[in-house]
């Protein structure tokens, strides 16, 4: 399986082709993808299939992407989010 | 790119219903465009990872390679219209490429997702839907935790728990709201599907062998933790889902998989103008179809979970039936089979019904709408102080159901909550108000602006 390098919160890590960002985060014991806009509560994947929009995360600088339905790509930068998208 | 292909049949949904329809159609030489949100066919039920051998077992999964099938993976229909017998679908392929297709014959098989109920702590990371945990496992070989509680109701919980056990996870408990005695009144229905009974017995053996306890007549009514779930509260519930006082105890775990059956995903069908109704069996909004799986809109058919929750076997039959009707082929055997499968599906929905005592599990701070962070207290205030009694008012005043998921997660239970607090039943227009979504699937803003110019 093809290895892929991605940057998670500033750190270079290895992933695999076909792995979702959500699965990659779980592998690194990172359950929360973001905090909420109003009450700053931690949130992570909930529905796992692209329905709920809880797993929002910043990918390549674009905020509010769904970790569960986005697959990793070589050189991708992934950053957990605070609120609507300031970088955590 | 725009394709006008009114001669091709378009199927939306790559789960059992859509695949079965496509398979029947291409066998007779018809040409099919199959639109699938997933990266490979299968939907939720046949979800599999890249190296899986599942496709060897099911002809339907291999149909995408047929020369008469154009399979569009990772494709969302974000807008759709119907006029003069022609459906126009606006597609977004892999989040990047736009395409528009038109057809006179459309089969909708958009499936369902987990039905959720709100409880204190259900928004903590590590709490996931049962389907979500299953999707991670089947699609990604990924585990949400190491010590997991599986809870909710329905025949789906056991395969989820078994998948986890097989993957080496410690399943701390299986918590099922129904009682096994509920089956006694349904033995007649069981004879319509002895394959399922055999599965059930195999499941029980594996669970027993793994020394996992199944708590019947119980529910997980709260979850606690700081940055993610650390423990959950198990309680006995009565037949109306009200917690039995003093029956609660804590279970430590690092994840909770919870599912309360399924909610049909009607966004596309509703956008096309297909009539919907409340399914009296489980209170969910479903697409109304006739004997031939045809919706109220001529030329648009619906099959599978969006016509009422019934499971994969029924979905396959409905997909084949829709295809047979389009092809004007024989339908007698399929109709008979569908009838039998419906009896079994009805029995399951009855045994694993959700009762509205769940509205007593929350405290004022419990989040109802996860997207907009609307709490029970916020909603109650709108009802009591501001006199809101309908869903429209509740949405406008609290923003419940107005976030990014557009009420997919909270719509049904917010409707039930408002109805109960206002002393009435859920009305058809409550649920329809949630199902009518301005954008069927969220798309990049630039694209939306372009769409508006059209
Ligand atoms: S977990 Fe629900 S959209 Fe990603």
Image (spheres, coloured by chain):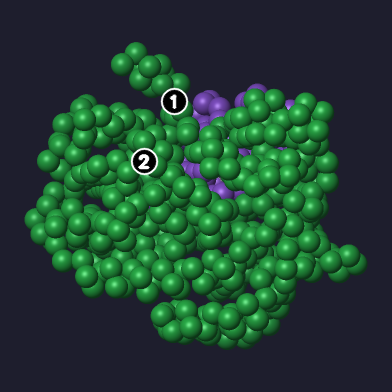
Chain colours: A purple, B green
Q: What's the CA distance linking mark 1 and mark 2?
A: 27 Å
**Disc 2 packing (10 Å; few <14; some 14–19; many ≥20):** many
Q: Is residue B136 visible?
A: no
In percent of width and height, residue B264 lies at 47, 50
Left/right placement of residue B232 relative to residue B42 reads: right
Residue beneath label 2, please?
B274
Q: Is residue B120 left or right of residue B22?
A: right
Q: Residue at x 44, y 39 (%)?
A: B267
- Classify B152 as above or below B417: below
Residue B169, above or below B110: below
Chain letter, disc 1 residue = B
Q: Give residue B339's mark.
A: none
Between circles 1 and 2, the one closer to the viewer is: 2
Farthest residue in the front direction?
Answer: B424
Q: Residues within 10 Å of mark 1 (few under 14, many from 20)?
A: few
Of the two numbered discs 1 and 2 on the same chain, state the one appearing first in sequence.
Answer: 2
* Residue in front for this viewpoint, B221 or B357: B357
- Residue A3's x, y, as percent? 43, 49
In terms of secondary structure, where does tag 1 sit? Answer: loop
The chain letter under disc 2 is: B
- Asked if one can make out residue B20 in the rendered structure from this viewpoint, the answer is yes
* Disc 1 to disc 2: CB gap under 8 Å: no
Q: Residue at x 9, y 56 (%)?
A: B29
Decide if residue B188 is on the left or right side of residue B5: right
Residue under label 1, please give it: B444
Q: Secondary structure at mark 2?
A: loop
Q: Is residue B212 above or below residue B396?
A: below
**Frontmost residue, B75 versus A79:** B75
Residue at 29% of width from left, 41% of height from top?
B297
Q: Is residue A13 left or right of residue B388?
A: left
């Amino acid at each position: 399986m093809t290895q892929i390098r991605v940057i998670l919160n500033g750190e270079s890590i290895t992933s695999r082709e076909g792995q979702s960002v959500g699965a990659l985060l779980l592998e690194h014991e990172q359950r929360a993808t973001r905090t909420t806009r109003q009450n700053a509560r931690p949130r992570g994947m909930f529905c796992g299939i692209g329905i709920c929009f809880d797993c929002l995360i910043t990918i390549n600088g674009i905020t509010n992407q769904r970790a569960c339905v986005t697959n990793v790509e070589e050189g991708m930068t992934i950053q957990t989010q605070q609120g609507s998208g300031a970088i955590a | 790119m725009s394709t006008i292909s009114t001669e091709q049949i378009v199927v939306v949904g790559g789960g059992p219903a859509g695949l079965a329809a496509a398979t029947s159609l291409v066998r007779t030489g018809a040409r099919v465009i199959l639109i699938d949100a997933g990266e490979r066919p299968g939907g939720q039920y046949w979800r599999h990872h890249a190296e899986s051998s599942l496709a060897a077992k099911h002809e339907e999964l291999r149909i995408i390679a047929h020369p008469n099938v154009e399979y569009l993976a990772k494709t969302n229909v974000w807008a759709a219209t119907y006029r003069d017998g022609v459906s126009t679908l606006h597609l977004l392929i892999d989040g990047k490429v736009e395409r528009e297709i038109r057809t006179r014959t459309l089969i909708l098989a958009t499936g369902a997702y987990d039905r959720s109920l709100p409880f204190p702590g259900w928004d903590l990371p590590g709490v996931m839907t049962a389907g979500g945990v299953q999707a991670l496992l089947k699609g990604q070989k990924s585990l949400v935790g190491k010590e997991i509680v599986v809870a909710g109701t329905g025949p789906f919980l056991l395969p989820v728990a078994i998948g986890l056990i097989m993957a080496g996870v410690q399943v701390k408990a299986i918590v099922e709201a129904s009682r096994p005695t509920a089956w006694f009144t349904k033995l007649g229905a069981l004879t319509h599907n002895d394959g399922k009974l055999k599965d059930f017995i195999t499941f029980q053996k594996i669970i027993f062998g793994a020394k996992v306890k199944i708590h019947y007549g119980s529910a997980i009514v709260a979850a606690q933790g700081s940055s993610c779930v650390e423990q959950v509260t198990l309680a006995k519930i009565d037949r109306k889902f009200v917690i039995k006082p003093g029956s609660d105890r804590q279970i430590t775990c690092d994840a909770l998989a919870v599912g309360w059956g399924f909610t049909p995903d009607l966004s596309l069908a509703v956008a096309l103008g297909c009539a919907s109704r409340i399914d009296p069996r489980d209170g969910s909004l479903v697409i109304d179809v006739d004997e031939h799986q045809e919706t109220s809109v001529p030329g648009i058919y619906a099959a599978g979970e969006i016509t009422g929750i019934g499971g994969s076997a029924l979905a396959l039959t409905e997909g084949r039936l829709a295809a047979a009707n389009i092809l004007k082929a024989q339908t007698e055997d399929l109709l008979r089979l569908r009838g039998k499968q419906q009896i079994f599906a009805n029995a399951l929905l009855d045994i694993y019904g959700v009762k509205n005592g769940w509205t007593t599990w929350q405290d004022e701070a419990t989040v109802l709408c996860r997207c907009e962070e609307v709490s029970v207290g916020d909603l109650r205030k709108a009802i009591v102080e501001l006199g809101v009694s309908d869903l429209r008012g509740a949405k406008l005043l609290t923003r419940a159901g107005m976030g990014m998921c557009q009420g997919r997660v909270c719509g049904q239970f917010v409707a039930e909550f408002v109805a109960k607090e206002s002393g009435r039943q859920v009305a058809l227009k409550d649920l329809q108000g949630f199902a009518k979504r301005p954008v069927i699937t969220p798309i990049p803003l630039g694209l939306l602006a372009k769409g508006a110019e059209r």
